[in-house]
Image: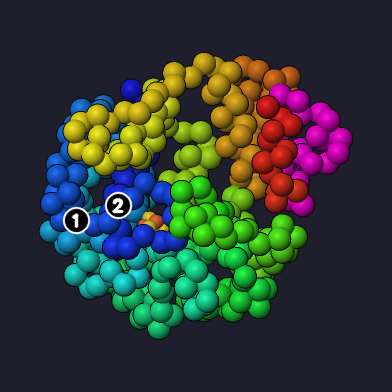
Amino acid sequence: MTSSPGVYIHIPFCRHICSYCDFCKVLYNSSWAKAYLQKLKEEIKENYMGEEVKTIYIGGGTPSVLSLEEIEYLLNLTNLFLKNNLQEFTFECNIEDITEELLILLKKYGVNRLSIGIESFDLDNQKLLQRVSVYDDAKSKIALARSLGFNNINLDLIYAIPHEKMRTLKNDLKDFLSLKVEHISTYSLMIEDNTYLSYKKVHHIPEELDEEMYFYIEHILEKYGYEHYEVSNFALPGYASMHNLGYWNNSEYYGFGCGASGYISGVRYDNTRSLSNYLKGDIRLNKEILSKDDIMEYELILGLRKLEGINIKEFYNKYGINIQDKFKIKPLLKTKELLYEDGQLKINPDYIYVMNEILVKLV
Ligand code: SF4
């Protein structure tokens, strides 16, 4: 049994399909949603081993596209978990779905963090992404959430959108900052295979502009008091996402639902991305029983995503081996791509943008 894992629940339904999306999702359909929630219940009952859970994250897809009745059913499923020590409970919503009734329901079941997919307020960006977020709507819905006691809100921002200029990003950041939320997740738009954008042969913006945008975002968000704590994530002090930190700290977590992944009792697994297979009960796509070497490698790769890096002593206490003896760290310390400071091994913040290249050199 794992001590206090996190729980991720995937809801693969959306009201429309965005042009860039390669997540596991289908258009919402109430009969599928009802069947899906039934299956989810079975999956949880079959696999949950009764631990106290530390965090719950309901993501998607778009969980808020479900009807209120379906959302209540879903929230009720979280009562299957032991939640006495629950520290964070996140629910992802699209801004247009937020209503007073929804927020009251979420509050009633202990949701204490909202994650809202805004992405961009710019009309040209929205046209390309094929999704809409209206600033005034966001402002009033966030105020409504505040009035009902939600004091931990994340907004997702997408940048490096084809044809996007620096001035567009600057305007988006100005708007995001004016909403005064506790957490901002930023994503450089990737053109993934099998998305509308890739069929249309849309290309990523030039690499130098992407880099310039990355460092501008960091500069401006830090100026406004946000801590850059993970390669793509910024939070006001005390508001880093506990659930996501669980991933980067290589802690264990259940993943339930179509397309979800999990890491429990030393086994990493992925569920099927096919809704029809999931509904048939053909849930697990694969599983990987990890060796100690694998676990150490995950610890390194995931831990270095955090700006604070990895605590060398904790690594030694966990695995009985010095991290320097296990991975090719010394050459990267010499080139200053990695730093060793106050007992922490970390990627030099100047190089965090090319983190993936550094990780390849390491493992
Ligand atoms: S980006 Fe989000 S809302 Fe858009 S289709 Fe994908 S999961 Fe659905």
In terms of image quarters, where does ligand 1 lie?
bottom left
Report the front residue among 113 and 97.
97
Q: Left of 322 or right of it: where is 77?
A: left
Q: Is mark 2 within 8 Å of ligand 1?
A: no
Q: Is residue 37 above or below residue 288?
A: below
**Is 330 included in the stretch rendered in magenta?**
yes
Q: Please give the residue where the numbered disc 1 appears in the rendered image.
A: 29
Query: What residue lies at 57% left-to-right and 37% top-to-bottom?
Result: 302
Q: Is residue 313 visible?
A: yes
Residue at image location 34% in from the left, 33% down from the top: 271
Which image quarter is the N terminus in?
top left
Q: Which residues are magenta?
A: 327-350
Figure quadrant of residue 186: bottom right
**In the structure shown, which secondary structural element does the residue marked by tag 2 occupy?**
strand
Q: How far from the left and from the top, in percent, is residue 20? A: 47, 58
27 left or right of 208? left
Tell me the distance, in whole angstroms, between the alpha carbons under discs 1 and 2: 9 Å
- Which scheme is used to colour this image of the protein? rainbow
Residue type highlighted by circle 2: Val
Q: Which mark is residue 26?
A: 2
Instruction: Say what secondary structure mark 1 lies in.
Output: loop
The quarter holding residue 268 reads top left
Up/down of 290 relative to 125, above or below: above
Cβ atoms under marks 1 and 2 closer than 8 Å = yes
Q: Residue type at mark 1? A: Asn
Residue 203 on image: x %, y %: 61, 59
